[in-house]
Amino acid sequence: MMWTCITDFFTYETTKSVVVKSWTIGIINRVVQLLIITYFIGWVFVHEKAYQIRDTAIESSVMTKVKGFGLYNNRVMDVAEYVTPSQGASVFCIITKFITTENQVQGYCPEVRPLTLPLALCLPTGRCVHFNDTLNTCEIRGWCPAEIDYIKTHPMMEVENFTIFIKNSIRFPLFNFTKGNFLPTITPQYIKACNFDHENNTYCPIFRVGDVIRYAHQNFTTLAQKGGVIGIKIGWMCDLDKSEDECNPSYSFTRLDAMSEKNSVSPGYNFRYAKYYKMDNGTDYRTLLKAYAIRFDVLVNGNAGKFNMIPTLINMVAAFTSVGVGTVLCDIILLNFLKGAEQYKAKKFEEVSDTQIENSLSSNGLYRSREFIGVEKQSNDSGAFSIGQYG
Ligand SMILES: *[C@@H]1O[C@H](CO)[C@@H](O)[C@H](O)[C@H]1NC(C)=O
């Protein structure tokens, strides 16, 4: 009993094949196999580079510097005034328009409200005071005088000619590969004069604000008037099986706050900040600034691939296995749609009933053990080692 179990276990089963000599199914079979092989070679291996291991965890550092002088309210503005924050990070704002409220101190003053709003109950202090000759508003307590932020001002148009200088270093930790956007071909003379464009200066790291906005399909005047967020994307798609010189950045530009572009409630981008001073007697006063700005976000993305045995093997196995998928399709056609499908079915699925088994058992005795013995005899003759040994 035990022995039977062991001998039953140590057996090998193999499928029996039915060879179909039919042109139709033969051609379909080869065409399907060819399609699958073409897909794997053309798309999976050549296009998607499935033989490579990929590093998508790009590490990057971005430094930026803006240059240019602008004229605003008869004052010359330099970088320290119109760029914020000043550290030169990957996100920075170029202020195009200010609404300045000077000499604010803590105290009581009339509130500013758009003329369209009705005068409700004056809650904070309960008093109604003269705002100007024609209008009364509620009195508030806070930084006074209150800001009037609906006055019309013109943006600083010179911003269009400002330049942004971007220094970007990247690293692919998996391959310990580092590179920067200053390519070895860039000389100091070139960098002094160049401005990025998509045709001739694709690797120049200096960008004119006007060009960036144009490449992002935006209008400079409206953007400067209302503010907005522009993305400068640096893509690093590197095939490290090739030469290092072919791993280069590609720049693209887009407007990131597309929602506020269409939205009428809060269009554009602005923020407030204040500069604080002290009077001789020790009380604080401040200048409040409401700034309309174009914010630039430098976004770096990328991945690198390099040949590796493991993905190559896995994908090759997947490719070979997938060739077998053709069989399923051919079987469906063969057994259902081809002429003589019934005969093929009969050949493919041999039906064995209980009575057939019993008949063969009674005529052959224990045919199974006999067969084994038969083979054993042969193997003894030839001296070869075969499955018959169990007999
Ligand atoms: C920008 O520079 C160009 C050429 O230097 C000049 O013609 C143009 O007037 C400048 N634009 C502004 C808004 O200053």
Image: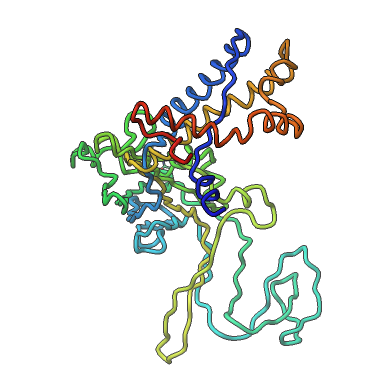
Foreground residue among 207 and 288: 207
Q: Decide if residue 323 is on the left or right side of residue 207.
A: right
Q: Identify the coloring.
A: rainbow
Residue 279 drawn at (x, y percent):
42, 86
Instruction: Give ligand 1's quarter of the image.
Output: top left
Q: Is residue 160 above or below residue 125?
A: above
> In the rendered image of this protein, does residue 254 appear above or below residue 115?
above
Q: Seen from this angle, which residue lies furthest bottom? A: 281
In-front residue for pair 132/306? 306
| Near-viewer residue (218 or 332) | 332
Q: Residue drawn at (69%, 74%), measured in percent from left and top?
A: 131
Q: Quadrant of residue 245?
A: top left
Residue at image coords 34%, 50%: 68
- Is 16 positioned to the left or the right of 238 in the image? right
**Residue 140 to residue 361: above or below:** below
Residue visible at 59% across and 70% down in the picture = 147
Give the residue drawn at x 46%, y 32%. 44
- Front one among 172 and 359: 359
In the image, residue 135 lies at what x, y percent? 75, 71
Q: How many marks?
A: 0
- Indicate the quadrant where residue 305 lies: top left
In the image: residue 240, left or right of residue 274 = left
